[in-house]
Image (cartoon, grey):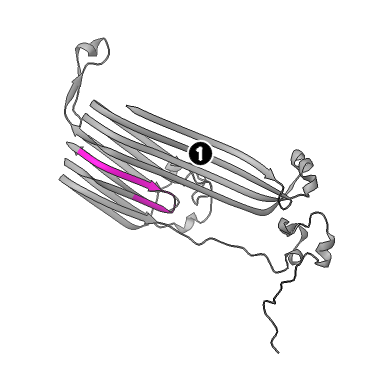
């Protein structure tokens, strides 16, 4: 058995002299599992991950990308698999400070923060598997005492389940095999909060295979971005699309499905004369006014465009 597990969590904050002061906060969490297993006996596998999306719509504990893998059975197994995920967050803020006062203000934490910031976040999960399992009853001696003289009998038919879920997009899909005598499959499941996909091709022998996919509508009561106690406290309701397929017996299955979610990004444009449009503290730092209020009152910060937007017609 070969297992490679990498788990990384990084947090950082940087400050750079750009338009007064530019503050950047970064957070990153990731894991990567690569595994290859072959042998005979009894096996049981459980893997679960929820990679959070800090800017998600369902509260800071109930969002992001989720995946679950379960396997069990007695007999032979020869499987190569991968399981990985990543969650990132970046916050870039413009702070009100003169360049020459950068070190003093930064050290004393006396910088006045404006409403000029950009946040970005992402969450991804990938599941891959290529292998075969064959059922056969088995007995083995365990330990050095009673069970060394009385071997344990294992008689478990094969079970295999993979579920991928996009919590931000309210959709999920999965592939499940129960009570099979043999299973040979290639599977790839992934979500990046925009696209959720499941690709399966394989053979199921004397068992039950199920394919599931569901898309839910967002409830009007969820418009508020309230923090929620945990992932188990809220149910998804109001499905707008459901796909269910069950096959009992011996089948060759080839399945490829993708669900996509998109929404328009909100954009804001500064007024044509931002230094005179509102209060002094609302002036974007990129206009480089600093503490010089003279430009605020004579509007000398405004740069006349080379061509009028609405030229006068004579």
Q: Is residue 180 visible?
A: no
Q: Which residues are magenta?
A: 183-197
Q: Secondary structure at mark 1?
A: strand
Quadrant in the picture for the N terminus: top left
Quadrant in the picture for the C terminus: bottom right
Instruction: Choose between 208 and 229: the one closer to the eye.
Output: 208
Expressed as whole percent of the image width and height from the top left, the position of residue 286 reads 71, 57
Disc 1 residue crowd, few under 14, some 14–19, many 20+, Cα 10 Å: some
Q: Does the magenta run of residues contain 185?
A: yes
* Mark 1 lies on residue: 29
Q: Does the magenta run of residues contain 127?
A: no
Expressed as whole percent of the image width and height from the top left, the position of residue 155 reads 18, 28
Expressed as whole percent of the image width and height from the top left, the position of residue 260 reads 39, 56
Expressed as whole percent of the image width and height from the top left, the position of residue 291 reads 82, 54
Q: Is residue 11 above or below residue 172?
A: above
Query: Residue 257 occupies which quadrant of the picture?
Result: bottom left
User: What residue is drawn where x is 83% and y is 59%?
Assistant: 293
């Amino acid at each position: 058995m070969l297992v490679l597990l990498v788990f990384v969590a990084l947090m950082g904050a940087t400050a750079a002299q750009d338009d007064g002061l530019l503050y950047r906060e970064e957070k990153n969490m990731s894991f990567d599992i690569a595994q290859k297993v072959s042998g005979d006996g009894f096996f049981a596998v459980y893997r679960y991950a929820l990679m959070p999306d800090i800017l998600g719509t369902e509260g800071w504990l109930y969002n992001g990308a989720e995946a679950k893998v379960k396997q069990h059975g007695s007999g032979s197994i020869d499987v190569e698999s991968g399981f990985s995920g990543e969650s990132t967050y970046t916050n870039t803020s413009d702070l009100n400070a003169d360049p020459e006062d950068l070190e003093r203000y930064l050290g004393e934490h006396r910088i006045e923060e404006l409403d000029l910031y950009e946040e970005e976040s992402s969450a991804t999960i990938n599941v891959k598997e290529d292998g075969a399992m064959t059922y056969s009853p088995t007995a083995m001696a365990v330990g050095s005492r009673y069970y060394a003289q009385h071997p344990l009998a294992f008689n478990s038919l094969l079970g295999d389940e993979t579920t991928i879920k996009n919590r931000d997009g309210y959709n999920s899909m999965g592939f499940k095999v129960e009570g099979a005598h043999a299973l040979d499959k290639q599977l790839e499941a992934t979500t990046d909060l925009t696209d959720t996909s499941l690709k399966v091709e394989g053979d199921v022998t004397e068992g039950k295979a199920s394919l599931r996919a569901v898309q839910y509508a967002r409830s009007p009561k969820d418009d508020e971005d309230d923090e929620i106690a945990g992932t188990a406290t809220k149910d998804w309701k109001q499905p707008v699309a459901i796909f269910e397929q069950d096959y009992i017996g011996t089948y060759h299955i080839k399945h490829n499905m993708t669900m996509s979610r998109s929404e328009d990004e909100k954009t804001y444009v500064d007024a044509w004369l931002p230094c005179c449009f509102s209060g002094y503290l609302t002036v974007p730092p990129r206009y480089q006014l600093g503490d010089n209020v003279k430009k605020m009152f004579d509007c000398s910060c405004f740069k006349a465009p080379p061509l009028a937007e609405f030229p006068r017609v004579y």
